[in-house]
Image (cartoon, grey):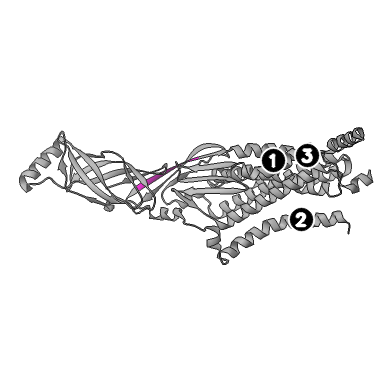
Amino acid sequence: MNKEKVLGILLSLLSLCLIIVPVVAAFAAHGWNPVETIMSGSNPLKDMGDLNFSENMFSVGEPTQGPNNTLIINAQFTSPLSFSFKIKSISGEGYSDSTSIGSIQLVGEVEFPPHATKTLSIICTPTQDGLNYIANYVIQHGSIPQIQPKNARFTIDIYGITAEFEMSG
Amino acid sequence: MIVMARTNWRKVVRRINWFGVIAGILMIVLPFAGRWWRLTVGTGAIDLTTSPFGITTTAFGQTMESTLARYIFLGATISIIIAGLFVLFASLLPEQWWSARLMDFGATKVFWMAIWLVMTPLIGAFIVNKILPGGQTLTIYVLGATISIIIAVLSKYLASKFLKKLWSKRLMKLATNVLWMIAGLFIVLAVCVFIVGKFLPSGVSGIVPGGTLNINTPYVSGSASTTFSMSMGGGQATVTLPISMGLMGGFALAIVTAVFSILAWIYHPGPPEEKKKK
């Protein structure tokens, strides 16, 4: 065998080694555990499985009177996620029992750091019927009625990914 | 004496493969010249920058790590530095018996890396945009693979019969290998079409219950949005993912390196056996 062929074989072996050795070394470094070898650190994508927003996740406080015959409803929300996101908008209809009070809307977008609890201020703009209902309710019960959202629409922004949720009923 | 020394020096300088010298230096620098391609989903939901020598991935503000990827990229970095040194030595001493072998080892590496870096997102986007929604037939891909294989075999045969010059043989070898790669890609696409047809007869939208999936991904460079909507409890959820991709500065240097490497390879004198044959 001449020296040129030997060199050719050695170069082929070098190419092969530079492919095989790193793969073997990587698996050996993690005790031949394939999952650890491929995904060594944290996997933030797993948290996407927790992305399950519903109306029940809000704890709605007592409504207070706002400017121009509006009502302000403060709702607390705790983020289950390990990364930050924004609630950009909430809109829908406000109901008390089965009576429509008026439209509801988030006052301003709210940014949630990981696992943070924040208060969402929602403004309810009552219709004339809604105002009459509230006035009667205050006379009868001495307090402003609880407002529940219906047909709510949420827009959430997670690092530029926009998710819109429409809850019927 | 001085005149003789100058004449010898000129001869040595004239023999040097200057394309190879430039290519060799560029190959050694290339792993440290930045990433070649980037992918962004949203405004940082997923940020990925990559080259054959490294990858940086952040998802939702957290860096993702893979030992396997890190070691493979380290292997590629060492490989290209060795190849660069070989091309450099081979170019400086083109008359040595080992010169042609070292040049063959290193010269086409960056070319193939650049080709793969473009082809991978291109084929990936094609699969996502055209094959996953379903409705594709196998015929065109099988035909594409068959034609590529026939042309590759034919060109190899014709090259061995008719091409005499070393540079033309090398060029034809490169072209034939590109044809083999194209054939391989057609086969990969055919397998994808087969799998989608077999397991997702109504396309990928079929796996979203009561929903729709409009996949739109850019090809290598550009921006697009993918939207999917699905029933969720008593309501409906719609998710929009803006996706952007682009080639980066490192890729421009890779192209320049690949051009110089191929020129150096074509220009380089053949191994001593071929010279004896002549």
Q: Secondary structure at mark 3?
A: helix
Chain letter for mark 1, please: B
Q: Nearer the viewer, residue B231 or B29?
A: B29
Q: Secondary structure at mark 2?
A: helix
For the residue carrying disc 3, how many other residues have a C-alpha within 10 Å: few (<14), some (14-19), or many (20+)? many
Q: What is the three-letter code of the residue carrying label 1? A: Leu
Q: Nearer the viewer, residue B142 or B2?
A: B2
Q: What is the three-letter code of the residue carrying label 3? A: Ala
Q: Position of residue B169 (x, y in %)?
A: 83, 42
**Part of the protein shown in magenta:** B236-243
Give the CA separation, mark 2 to mark 1: 23 Å
For the residue carrying disc 1, how many other residues have a C-alpha within 10 Å: few (<14), some (14-19), or many (20+)? many
- Residue located 94% across and 46% down the image: B276
Is A127 placed left or right of B211 in the picture?
Answer: left
- Does the magenta portion include A24? no
Label 1 vs 3, first from the N-terminus: 1
Q: Residue furthest left?
A: A139
Residue B115 seen in this snapshot: no
Instruction: Give the image quarter of residue B220.
Output: top right
Provide the residue designation for mark 3.
B264
Chain letter for mark 2, please: A
- Residue located 88% across and 59% down the image: A1
What is the chief secondary structure element of the magenta stretch?
strand
Q: Position of residue A30 (x, y in %)?
A: 56, 64
Chain letter for mark 3, please: B
For the residue carrying disc 2, how many other residues have a C-alpha within 10 Å: few (<14), some (14-19), or many (20+)? few
Provide the residue designation for mark 1.
B26
Provide the residue designation for mark 2.
A12
Q: Nearer the viewer, residue B222 or B186?
A: B222
- Residue located 52% across and 41% down the image: B217
Q: Position of residue B150 (x, y in %)?
A: 77, 45
Q: What is the three-letter code of the residue carrying label 2? A: Ser
